[in-house]
Structure formats: C-alpha cells, structure tokens
Image: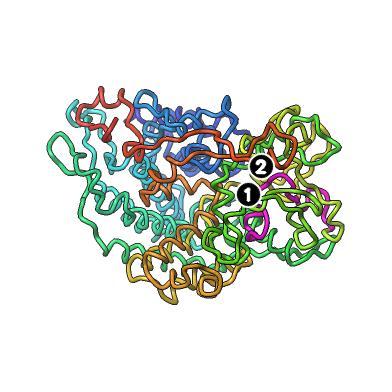
Amino acid sequence: MRKYIIIGVQAAMILIAFNSCKKFLDVVPDNVATIDNAFTMRTQAMKFLYTCYSFMPRNGQLGDDPAMVGGDELWEIPERGAYLDMAKGFQSKVGPLGDRWQSMYQAIRDCNIFLENIGKVPDMLPEEKSRWIAEVKFLKAYYHFCLVRMYGPIPLIRTNLPISSDVNQVKVFRDPVDSCFNYISTLLDEAAIGLPAIVISPATEAGRITLPIALSLKAKVLVTAASPLFNGNTDQSALKNSDGTQLFNTTFSQDKWDIAAIACREAIDACANVGMKLYMYNPSFQQFDVSDTIKTQLSISGAVTEKWNSEIIWANTQSNTDNLQRLISNWWDPRYLDGVVTRGELSPPLKMAELFYSSNGVPINEDKTYDYTGRYNLRVAGDADKLYIHKGYTTVGIHFDREPRFYADLGFDGAVYYGHGRYDDNDFMGLFYLEGKFKQRNGKGKYGYNTVTGYNLKKLIHFQNVVNSNTDYSVVNYPYPIMRLSDLYLLYAEALNEFEGPGEEVNKYVDLVRARAGLPKVAVAWANFSTNPVKFQNKDGMRSIIRQERLIELSFESQRLWDLRRWKESATELNKQILGWDLSQTEPISYYRTTVVYNQSFGSKDYFWPIDENYIVNNRNLVQNLGW
C-alpha cells in the first residue's frame, strides 16, 4: 500500500508541475511517502484531495483533449498536433493516441486510497469529511466514465488490491459494459448525498463538485448508456473475456432511455433550485448601446466565454483558455499584421459551415426559401448583412441568411468581428473583419499561420480580447466548460423523445435553447419553412432535429466526437471529405471553389480506442477491442 501512495503522489506531481496557477485544483501536494503521514491531519488530507482532482483531463487543451482535433469539426495545420493523426486514421495499438488508460487508473487508485483512509483524520468535522468523501466518489465515477466512453467495457476498480496480492489477483478481467455504467451511476448516487448545492466560497472553491454537477454527470452517463453504441450494439457481440463472459449486452433496452430521462429531469431541477438559467447578455454597464443582433451574438458566445455565468454547470479550473484563445484568434487588427501572438490555427471544415441552420431555423438543405443549389454562388453584402458580413464585401452565398450561431461561431472571408476594442456597432464599417484570400491580411501566403479550410474558429474567443501590438494580446481568461445547461436540456429532450416520442415537453427544452439563439420554435420553423413540415411530429424526425440542434449548440466544445460515437454516426460523418476553399486564389470566383483538404477514413474498430498492447502482454486476461 505504501508503494501505491508513493506512485500516486509522484504521478500527480508530474501531471501538475507545469501549471503555476495556485488555485483550488492547482495545488501541488507534498511528496508524502506514507499513508500515515498523508492522513494524520486535515491539512495533509486536503493535499491528497487535491491529488485526486489533479488527474482531471485538461478539456480544451490540444495536447490532452482528443475531442478537439481528433474528429472532424476542427482541422489543424498538418505539422502541429498529434491528435490530428487520430482524425487522419493513424490510430494504433502501439502507443495509442489520446491514451488515458494508465493515468485514469492511477487516478482511481488514489481515489481509493483517499476513501479508505479519510476516516483516520482526527481534526475534521463529520460534515466536512462527508463532503470530501462525496467529492472523491464523484471523481472516481468520472474517471471510470472517461475510460468507458473511450474503451468500452473496462475493469472496475472498486477497491485497491493489497500489496500481498498474488499474480492472478492482479490480472483482472474487463467487466461487462452494463456493469460499468451501473457502478458509475451508483457512485454518483452515493456522492450526491454528501455534496452541497453550491460552493460556499466561489472565490476559493470554484470548480469543486456540487450536487448539480453530480446529477448532471449522472444524466450524461445514463444517456450515453442508453445510446446505440452501448445499448443493443450487435457489432460488439464477439467481444468476450477469455472465460467467455459477454462484454456487451446485444439486446436493446427501451427502459434505459426512461432511466436516462428521469436522471436528466432530476439534474435540471437541481440546477433550477440554485438559480441556474441559460445565459443572456445583460451587463450592468456598457459603453455603447448595442443592437439586438449584437446582443444575441454576445449571448451565444458568452454562454461559453463568460466566466462562471448562469448556465455553467461545471468548468475545469485546471484548463484555462488563455493559450487556446491565442491559438485560435485571428490577427484581425490591420495595424498589427506581422505579429505571432494570434495564430488563427484551428480551422472548421466546410461541413461545419453547412451544419448550421438558415435564418429561419431549419437545415439549409430543407429550407424551401433558401437557395441551397446556389449556395456557392457569389453575393455582395448589403445593409441587412452589415453586422455579420462587411458591407460591400463579395463572398459566397452560403455565408448569407444563416442563423445567429453561424456568425457567432465561425469566422470567414468577409466576416465581421464585434468587439476586440471596437464596441460601437453603429459604426459598423469600423468593426474588424477578415480578408481571407491569398496574401490578404488573413489569407494564405502571409507571415505566420492561417486557416487551412477558409474558415476560422470564432467561438471560444472572448469579445473583449484586444491585440495591443505585434507582441501583446490581452486575453480575458475563463475555465473551459465541461457541461452547460443547454447541454443538459438537449440530453433531456433526446432521452424523452427516445423513450416516448415527440411532445410538448421535448419541444420545450429544445425551444429554450433555440430562443437564446434567436430562432423560432421547432413547430413554427418546420411548419412554415421546411420541405418536411411534419418532421418534428414523429420520433425519427425529432431525433434528427435534436441531434442537429445539439451538434450546432455544442459545436467546438469537445462534444461532437463523443456524440457521433455514441449515436454510431461516426462511420458516416468521418468518412466524408474534409473540404475547404481554394486558399491559393486571389479573386472570389476562384477562391470559392471547394477543395479537398483530406480524405478521412473511419472503420467500425475506431469506435473504441485500442488498449495499448503492452498492457495486454502484461495481463493476458485483458482482451483487446475488436479490430485491433
């Protein structure tokens, strides 16, 4: 057991040694060598609590989040970023890209050590001890969930093995996937009992686990368990342990959707009880009166970028966005075109631009008023477009008449950027905008980096960031959101639709998300503008609506990769070409020709990560995932 504590503390120190921010989740624990020392007093036990938190994956960090560029919603400059190789189909069982097997099991072992020993601490009140136990049970559940959605069935580590265990006890088997989800759900139920509804001191405790966080994670866990990848997946029927244990239940269970819907409803109620609501831009002071158009834009972007706003259920304080914002921001200020403080590196492909709705709130390929066949024809921005596209600018038709989230999330040739030092939208000609053609200020062939598709990522950038010089970029930092209220609303709508079909309650929570985005209700939009006006009235049609709503609302937030997998849609979406514009052209007529950036390939084996072959060599009871 002493061996476990030494390894656990050292691994935790390595993981957080490079982060200098001394906040709650960033405290480097002392190199405590024995359990006796680690739990002799409250201050030492708190350091071990920090250790349990320290293993949390750094969401939104390119080096630690495969969901950023490991799928298909963002493409990166080819020579940068290892996870782009995963998107290209270069995954391997030898040193798998994005592998979390070792780090997550180390985290789980340290959580077990904490739970086994926290009772020994003498100078703690029972209620505080209960809260810490609840937090660590939550973390233990979360780390198991991180493993399950990556690898599928995993060995469950309920308790640590004693140091005296023989070799056969150490060589554990994988548990059936239903057992994995049940165990995670049980841990979250146990954690919920001891968690506070809110943190007592936001200034010092932001990021610590609360009741709404635990219930919201449980909702996501159970929706995942009910989804096609895990619920009746016959493609995994051959995955068995060496003793013959079937690891996937191949029989579909409708009841799983009911259980998931109930969990979502409970989480929504918990969030409402503490005053959480969808974020709407409404500052106590602003220098200029801004139009409703810009207010909608700021409500959409601020839901992510406004620190601890009213809809952030859980954000990762170990994953602040300063570096990420520098990486994705454009050098939009024409005074400073030779700097490297902003890079504009991550590039949404054309498929993401086409994903967003028309201004009528329906897909562009089924809006009967939208010129879908002529979407690649050129148009000139007029007065009605002036806050989205620079007035008088020639760009492609697909950039016109789109929903507000399109303009809030994506930058493109001619796109207006509100803010960044210019806040008077009455002076619309003075707002920053992009020029993306060859050797233009934001185009290919200029100093520094540039988009590889013709699109830039506007989402995740705070509108008050300012380029001060070629070498100085002021960034409004915020912790990367793990879960927002809109995410939970759409999970609930999805689960309810899958269990009982469309209805008023399903529409209500989709419509709440759409209203913040400035869109009409589903029933109104489809009845008036869709070529399939009754689509929302049947389960299959509403499923399609909910999924597209989710992919739009949560785009570029490390969600799409996991959603496509659990829906078993990756084999469709990740076998499509990554397309962009012809970036080597100077004239619009030539620039706006679709160009293949990459031909993606995704097979059935890619739904789950391979287990590193070294782990299987060391433990022959550990069977490899199918196809690897």
Q: Quadrant of residue 25?
A: top right
Residue at image point 76% right, 58% down: 387
Please tell me which of labels 1 and 2 falls first in the chain: 1
How far is the residue under mark 1 from the one under mark 2? 7 Å
Q: Residue furthest left?
A: 243
Identify the secondary structure beneath mark 2: loop
Residue at image point 79% right, 52% down: 390
| Nearest the eye: 280 or 239 | 239
Q: Position of residue 530 (x, y in %)?
A: 52, 68
Q: Which residues are magenta?
A: 399-424
The N terminus - image quarter: top left
Q: Is residue 118 visible?
A: no
Q: CB under 8 Å between callouts 1 and 2?
A: yes
Q: Quick check: 555 left or right of 146?
A: right
Q: Quick check: 286 left or right of 100?
A: right
Q: Which residue corresponds to mark 2?
A: 592
Q: Quadrant of residue 166?
A: top left
Binning the other alpha carbons within 10 Å of mark 2 as few (below 14), some (14 to 19) or many (20 upward) gives many
